[in-house]
Image (spheres, rainbow, N blue to C red):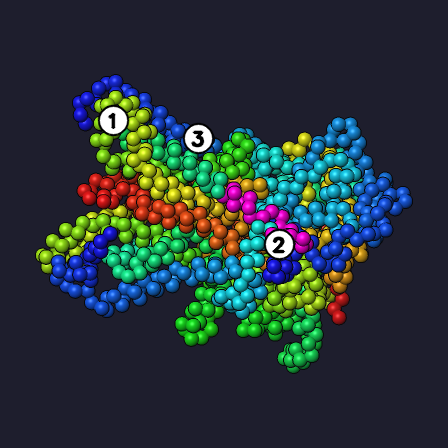
Amino acid sequence: MEGRGHPFLPSASKRHQQSSQMKRSIPFEIFRYAAILAAIAVTLVPILWMVSMAFKPIGEWSATGAELTWWPKHPTLANFQFVFGESANDLIVALDHTALKPILSSLLSAVFGTVIAMSAGTAAAYGLSRFGSGQNLPLALIQLRLFPPMAVMIPVMIMWSFLNFNDSWWGLALIYGIVTLPFAFWLMKTFFDDMPREIEEAALVEGCSRLRVFTRITLPMMRAPLASAALFVFILNWSDYLIALLLTTREWVTIPVYMASLSSSMTGQLYGAKAALGLIAAVPPVIMGIAIQRHLVRGLTFGALKQ
Amino acid sequence: MSTALATPALRDEGARLGFRLTLPAQILVLFISAFPLLMQLYISVTDWSPLSGLGWWNAWEMWNSFANYTDLAADGRFWSALKRTVIVMVVCVPAEFLLGLALATLFADDFPGKRIFYSILLMPMMVVPAVAGYMFFMLFQSGGPVNDILSAIMGGPVTIAWLSDPTLALIAVMIADIWQWTPLMFLILLAGLVGVPQDQIKAATLLGANPWQRFTSIVLPKMKTIIIIALAIRVIENFKIFDTLYIMTGGGPGVATETISVYIYKVTTQDLIWGYVAAIALAILVVLSIVAVFAMKCMARARQVPA
Amino acid sequence: MSDLIRISRRRLLASGGKAAVFVAATGIAPQFIRPGRAFAADALAPGMIGGPTGFDGAERYQYGPDTPEGRAIEAAKALKAAGKAPAKIVLGLSDGSIGQLTKPFPAGAPSIKELWEKETGIAIEIVGLPNGQEFTKTMQDISTKGGAYDIYSTEWNRLGDLAETGGIAKLDDFVAKHKPEWDDPKQGYVNGAKGVSLLNQYRGSSYGVSLDGDFQTWVYRTDLFGDAAEQKAFKDKYGYDLAPPKTWKQHGEVAAFFQRPDKGLFGSTDLRNQGWGYTNWYQRYVSMASPNQFLFGDDGKPLINSEHGIAATNEYAESLAHHSPDAISWGWPEQYGNFAKGGAAMTCAFSNLPKFLDNAGNKDSAVTGKIGSMLPPGREIDGKLISRSVLWFSLTGMVSSQSKNPEVAYLLLQWLGSARIYAWMSANPGGYLDPFRLSDFSDPLVRQTYHAYHMDVVRETVARTVPTINYPGATAFHNALDENLMASLTKAKTAEQAMADTETEWKKIARRIGEDKLLEAIKTNKEAWPTVLDPIS
């Protein structure tokens, strides 16, 4: 990528200085770095607090008014070992259940929720974009997303119980798939709308069936947008607390719900363990985010950006 | 579209495929709206509660002739929760927007360190909101890091009890929301900003426009669509604010940070007056549907602006 | 590895409070740590048909055929033989209490679960319920007809609400048939039949079996109160000796004396958050009249919007001054954590606080050996001291109406809740089920785990404990009170406004529930209120 000029501020790079009548001042650069560093400081305080907490032994947690420790004086991995139940090894500690199952539950429900939302959403978006089917969907799905999930949880709890979906990852996956369907649909619809149709039409003229065009030509071309939409949907599902709180009890509680129960009366809230788990929970979004960072931007702009 | 593709056979095939492709999404939408809507309509005109000992289908025995709706109109707690939700929204969303736009402006051209700063600024998005809730709970303790930083700045001990004061608690949860979601605004707006065509800027510069004029006359109009989308996403999601807030304050102290979702959560799980909850849900649905239709129109108009 | 061991020994050993996922044994009892020691007593004592074996004193927990435990086991076996028993009973239980059923205690003993399964051949499947979610999950199961449990366990005062739903089974027939002897004068419930009525019954019928004793009990720091310099400074300032306060006025002064936030010490850290704070308000309010200031009159009229209600509310709000600035956002985990670090001079908590914090196995506690117990502060009225505590939370087991085997489910509850098994179970440091039966207070194992000094005070506290609202609408009544008390704590409302608004809300709730249902329940509830008056020393 070549350096580009600033859209409206005076530009500093040589290429643009020629075309720009004003020169960027040194004070501006100082201001820029100062402002960015300030923003980064604010961004990092809670994150560093979490990282530091995850490696602190209990004496340094200081949640309740004792001396404040910013950085672990005696760093330890014990919080991580603890949430995975390792400390139970031939000691008298027993974690009633370790974080493994909740992590599995979060993964399964978020992944399959994403699969449901993306398959139904992509198919419907294509159907509407190309054939004008399902004219009711855009409005219906906006309403669905606008509506606080809390307000439908009573009937949902009754339905899920009737279907025997309570406290199961598949029950969660289904509701996740539904609540994130609007995002999948809207993102994919914009991509399909913006996609040039010449290739599809050429294939049709060649005698391909419409379905074949969709599965063999359109979808492979849309790999990148699909990935960015899927990541966004995944992060939404992965972040949920409220729905899992109401629809799971024990076997398939997700990470945030499990985290709420990490406390004891010997010590109060187990902040170290919570922070350790919080760090672990950040891993999937970070990995996926890095993998498709570029597409993410395009996905989130709903195609309003024509590059 | 070429005439070869407009044959009736192909059109029929398209209509059939379109129907089939939109079917899964239609089923999911129907699945999540039909029963919940009918059930909530039904129980919303009764005093039914799971405590009543009747199955919900027998709720008619507790018919209360719209008393829930008249109660709702007079329910101070509901209206103040709604007011609070709106306050949080009108503070957080513009704050996130302005901060995001300011940061995007600083990032719009190249400078040393851009990539790493950019990645750091996006980190809050990767933190699960529930985890952020625990971290902010600790940060805002009276002997916690926030006061520690303030003490360093003010040069004297600061012991503000953030979460125990109604106003400060509301500010604290808004800070947490702004921290978590400004990065999303930044990401989207930056994408929009770098998408503004360079040649138009150059032209304006040559015509002698100053930075402010370039910003208002070229950049802003070009970014209108993206700004609307970014604001719409945040307004929709912010209205449902629950996870971080609930973990930080539980809606307290008292009802000082009780938003619509928290209020409904409490009446659902503690007071258990489900007939009443249904009435709240339907009232919200009506209001939100109007908002949705309006939003659709805005979106449609925004997308028609030539890019 | 050394870190690993340290973290384990330190805090993660055992957990307490009402909410943990950790159910672990602790180092309280040395024999607990090293299993497998040989014990002589590995067979039942003569004449006994069942009970634990394998440790010294096991015979205390063994039972003959003519005991509630013996009858429960025999009846369950008979049902099993007749093919009328299920392969397993599903028990919903707070996460933090599961250890008491699944961890062997003391060393050499079987676990409670193993013992039942061995004696009856019917398995127990325990489904844990998360932090504070017991009632929510129970209601979910009832209202959605989930049928996931045979036995629910929720806070005791939800019994009325749950009985009205029809979601829990009436146990009268089983009680008549299997005779649990809850009102036994020596081993049974405190206050005999009245105590049974309070904890297990609703409108004259049995619906639950109490499995807990959360009588809120006061503790203080013996090191601070016994310090000569502190004593002198206190006497110089207030003119009387520093001692555990007898009255609320003294309590306020002692708390103010120890309030040193810059040194990390608070005067008194009884809870002030939502869902808990009003336990302190209760204590202040009910002691306003002799023998009690009731919440409702016999005619069902709320009495809180009165001089006494307003005075208690003002006092309650003013007492925030000697608490942590974060008091309103603290739950019990913060309270226990702070107390463990030596951050408070006094507090009021579950009776298990010394079990966990005055505990050689808890290396993180800075207050081991420094905790003393005291009776709740009171008020002088007509030459007598009115000292009152409150029963709050306290789990009760109930049989689901959806259970296909209500009788076996009941038999398990009868067995668990009877004198011998219950004492043995509550002595187990692996969970939160606390002692409440007369037999528990004198039990050597219980006194070892909970400390003898504490058990004597708990027994006296029980005699001074008022029940919270346990009639239908309990949750709604408490929420309305809670919301308004919180408003007065944060100065959003004056005490007068708060009490007036509570009264309005309560009247509305009472209408929803039905006045006649309520009057009867209020009357039954009042019968359980204490009448003890203390001399003024």
The residue at the point 58 percent across, 34 percent down is C146
> Which image quadrant is residue B28 in?
top left
Part of the protein shown in magenta:
A86-106
Chain for numbered disc 1: A
| Dot 3 crowding, Cα within 10 Å, few <14, some 14–19, many 20+ | few
Q: Position of residue C422 (x, y in %)?
A: 76, 48
* Horizontal arrangement in the rendering, residue B171 relative to residue C78 (left or right): left
* Horizontal arrangement in the rendering, residue A2 relative to residue C123 (left or right): left
Q: Residue A87 carries which label?
A: 2
Q: In which quarter of the image is the C terminus of chain C?
A: bottom right
Whether discs 2 and 3 lie on one chain: the answer is no
Chain for numbered disc 3: B
Query: What residue did someone put label 1 on?
Result: A203
Q: Which is nearer the N-term, disc 2 or disc 1?
A: 2
Whether discs 2 and 1 lie on one chain: the answer is yes
Q: Is mark 3 on a helix, strand or loop?
A: helix
Residues at circles 2 and 1 in contact by the CB criterion of under 8 Å = no
Residue type at mark 3? Answer: Phe
Q: Which mark is residue B31?
A: 3
Q: Residue A177 carries which label?
A: none
In the rendered image, the residue lying farthest to the top is B9
Residue type at mark 1? Answer: Ala
C277 in the magenta segment: no
Q: Is mark 1 on a helix, strand or loop?
A: helix
> Which image quadrant is residue A271 in?
bottom right
Can residue C385 be seen here?
yes
Depth order, front residue of B48/C149: C149
Chain for numbered disc 2: A
Depth order, front residue of C450/C482: C450
The residue at the point 54 percent across, 69 percent down is A67
Residue type at mark 2? Answer: Ser
